[in-house]
Image (cartoon, rainbow, N blue to C red):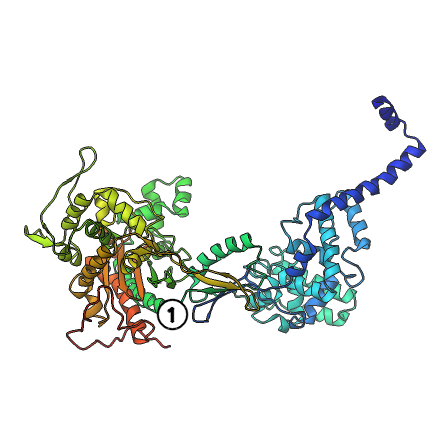
């Protein structure tokens, strides 16, 4: 049988050729039908032109953000200059209004050119729209399968959309570089005006870019862009949209570009929104929603008033600290080639690697780059920018009320609340004291303040020190925590054991960062996140019960129907209530007379609060966390590169760098009565009154 088939192929008959020719279109049709399930569904296509991004709303009803897939402002066809449409149709698809998605008169010549070795485009506007809307399903590979998928999708689009809807969708989805999607953003980016105001020259320039965004970019390649623009004008003449005489004059005009990149609005809580977007994408995928087109309304826990206060407090304090950092790190002090640390910074740059690749020795490369003032200034600036994180949580239900991840989201999108792990210093000490109180210790119990040597693995030893010399006298646990004594805390850690303290910290909220069960952990040597620490301090105030932090209370559709509710998490008892009450009472002394006393003396806050400062070795990391019955707030201050410090023992301390941020925040919140100044911690105690009139602040300007 095989021999007969082979003979038939070698000696085809007229009947065999006819059957073969008849079979080819049938096979192609069968292949097309087989591809249909692998193209977008009609329902998805109907959704594609509905730009309804998820709206993120604060607990008090203010808009925080919108989740758009790209930087785009969707406009109707009536809001787009008619010159854009005329130029588009004349250049890209002159029979747009006559075909139904595929222009057969263009497909055949394009296919013949392609088969002859010269690729030629034959895609209609509708086919291009299919590629733009469904880059994954349709793709852009030059294959028959891709072209068939594109054609099938184009036919589906034509069956669902009107011609005007196709044009509107196309013009709102095409990319124009610089993160500008759609003609509205393109008009603002390249000409500083809305799409409705584009003149014929500007319209032709933007339509000309569609052939190749980069090649015909009027900023990068003005000459080629001008030539392409004039080609578009000639096409408009060819198809009756422009008079020849007008075209001759227009072609002599300059591009008239007014370029400005359009940044996406970040909102008042951009780092919070970034974390929320990740969570919401997962929720939407599991529940069959699209965060970009289903018009979801996400009700969050953020209080917009507290968020504004947090933003102001962080901006004010980091601005003060930056001036100190600038004095410590400039081309005469820290940022000069004689500084070994600055030399290390230079060695990390691409410029240094290029110099070494060019044959320069290490000293020669350092000298060459150190002579480049612009390079030195830029490197110094990038390494010595103060950074900070701030978080406030309601301890009663875990609701996140304010979240500031850096000084400026555009300059520093890295989140110092959720992503950064830094050593917490003495803010970790409450876990040691909490473990002791859980074992029955009392705040009045004493440990001798003396030099101690603690044996580690092998022959290593650890000798904790304090700024003050040891007194040799018994010191109460209350005083040791209030005054942040390392020697006493280290001895208490020996008594309780690192494993027990690690387990307690985990239960109280430090649940993601690894903790080393070693004696020095008592002084906060294992890096953690600010979110974990503030969450754990909420556990202290909440009578030892941990409540998982919450970002979202419910999700609604655009008509207000509730799609999902997210109640507060069930409390998990992490620390016995009696121990938590002792810990709160002792931590009151931190702000009444200890390392956090500036809360009362400088900021005049007389509400019932407790807290703890933290400073790591070398003043690398500065912390302060304050506990109020309705709000626990904490701040971290430092540099992204932990080798950089303020080079000043006073300003490097948490009491002088992180505390003012928290103090300013609470001052504003109490003045505005967003939190209750009369609320009492447990166990209740008489409200502390300042011994002098409350100071008037001249460093903050706020309004509500």
80 over 512 or under it: above or below: below
Looking at the image, the residue that sits furthest to the right is 14
- In this picture, residue 566 sits left or right of residue 503: right
Badge 1: residue crowd in 10 Å (few <14, some 14–19, many ≥20): some
Left or right relative to 647: residue 450: left
The C terminus lies in quadrant: bottom left
Q: Position of residue 124 (x, y in %)?
A: 74, 56
Q: Kindly identify which residue carries mark 1.
A: 308
x, y percent for residue 332: 26, 57
| Element under disc 1 | helix
Q: Quadrant of residue 583?
A: bottom left
Placement of 399 over or under 455, stated as above or below: below
Q: Quadrant of the N terminus?
A: top right
Residue at 83%, 42% (x, y): give it.
Answer: 26
Q: Note whether 492 is above or below 698 in the view shown.
A: above
> Quarter-wise, where is residue 406 in the image?
bottom left
Residue 342 is at least partly visible in this image = no
């Amino acid at each position: 049988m095989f021999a007969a088939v082979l003979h038939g192929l070698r000696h085809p008959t007229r009947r065999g050729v006819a059957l073969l020719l008849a079979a080819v279109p049938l096979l192609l049709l069968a292949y097309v039908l087989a591809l249909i399930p692998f193209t977008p569904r009609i329902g998805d296509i109907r959704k594609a032109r509905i730009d309804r991004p998820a709206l993120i709303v604060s607990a008090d009803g203010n808009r925080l953000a919108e989740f758009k897939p790209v930087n785009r402002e969707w406009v109707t066809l009536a809001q787009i200059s008619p010159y854009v449409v005329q130029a588009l149709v004349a250049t890209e698809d002159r029979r747009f209004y006559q075909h139904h998605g595929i222009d057969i008169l263009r497909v055949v010549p394009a296919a013949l050119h392609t088969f002859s070795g010269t690729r030629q485009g034959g895609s209609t506007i509708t086919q291009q729209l299919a590629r733009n809307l469904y880059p994954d399903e349709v793709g852009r590979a030059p294959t028959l399968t891709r072209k068939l998928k594109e054609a099938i999708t184009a036919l589906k689009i034509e069956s669902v959309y009107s011609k005007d809807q196709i044009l509107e969708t196309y013009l709102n989805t095409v990319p124009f570089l610089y993160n500008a999607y759609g003609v509205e953003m393109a008009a603002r980016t390249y000409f500083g005006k809305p799409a409705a105001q584009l003149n014929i020259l500007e319209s032709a320039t933007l339509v000309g870019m569609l052939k190749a965004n980069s090649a015909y970019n009027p900023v990068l390649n003005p000459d080629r862009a001008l030539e392409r623009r004039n080609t578009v004008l000639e096409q408009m003449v060819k198809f009756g949209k422009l008079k020849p005489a007008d075209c001759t004059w227009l072609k002599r005009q300059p591009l008239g570009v007014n370029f400005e990149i359009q940044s996406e609005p970040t909102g008042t809580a951009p780092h919070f929104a970034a974390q929320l977007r990740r969570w919401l994408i997962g929720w939407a995928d599991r529940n069959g929603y699209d965060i970009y087109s289903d018009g979801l309304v996400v009700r969050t826990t953020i209080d917009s008033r507290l968020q504004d206060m947090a933003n102001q407090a962080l901006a004010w304090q980091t601005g003060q600290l930056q001036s100190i950092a600038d004095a410590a790190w400039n081309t005469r002090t820290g940022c000069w080639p004689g500084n070994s640390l600055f030399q290390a910074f230079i060695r990390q740059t691409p410029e240094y690697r290029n110099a070494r690749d060019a044959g320069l020795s290490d000293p020669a490369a350092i000298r060459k780059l150190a002579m480049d003032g612009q390079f030195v200034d830029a490197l110094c600036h990038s390494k010595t920018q103060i950074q900070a994180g701030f978080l406030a949580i309601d301890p009663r239900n875990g609701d996140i009320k304010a979240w500031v991840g850096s000084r400026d989201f555009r300059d520093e999108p890295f989140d110092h609340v959720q992503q950064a792990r830094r050593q917490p210093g003495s803010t970790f000490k409450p876990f040691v004291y909490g473990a002791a109180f859980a074992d029955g210790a009392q705040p009045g119990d004493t440990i001798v303040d003396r030099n101690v040597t603690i044996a580690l693995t092998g022959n290593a030893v650890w000798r904790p020190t304090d700024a003050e010399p040891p007194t040799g006298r018994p010191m109460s646990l209350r005083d040791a925590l209030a005054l942040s004594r390392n020697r006493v805390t280290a001895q208490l850690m020996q008594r309780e054991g690192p494993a027990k303290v690690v387990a307690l910290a985990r239960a109280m909220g430090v649940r993601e960062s690894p903790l080393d069960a070693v004696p020095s952990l008592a002084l906060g040597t294992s890096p953690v996140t600010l979110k974990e620490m503030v969450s754990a301090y909420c556990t202290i105030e909440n009578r030892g019960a941990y409540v998982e932090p919450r970002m979202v209370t419910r999700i609604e559709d655009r008509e207000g129907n509730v799609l999902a509710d997210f109640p507060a998490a069930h409390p998990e008892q992490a620390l016995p209530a009696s121990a938590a009450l002792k810990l709160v009472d002792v931590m009151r002394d931190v702000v009444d007379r200890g390392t956090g006393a500036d809360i009362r003396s400088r900021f005049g806050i007389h509400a019932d609060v407790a807290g703890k400062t933290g400073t790591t070795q070398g003043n690398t990391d500065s912390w302060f966390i304050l506990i109020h019955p309705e709000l626990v707030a904490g701040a971290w201050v430092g540099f992204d590169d932990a080798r950089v410090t303020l080079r000043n023992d006073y300003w490097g301390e948490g009491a002088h760098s992180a505390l003012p941020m928290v103090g300013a925040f609470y001052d504003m919140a109490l003045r505005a009565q967003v939190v209750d100044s009369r609320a009492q911690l447990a166990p209740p105690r008489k409200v502390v009154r300042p011994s002098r009139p409350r100071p008037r602040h001249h460093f903050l300007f706020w309004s509500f």
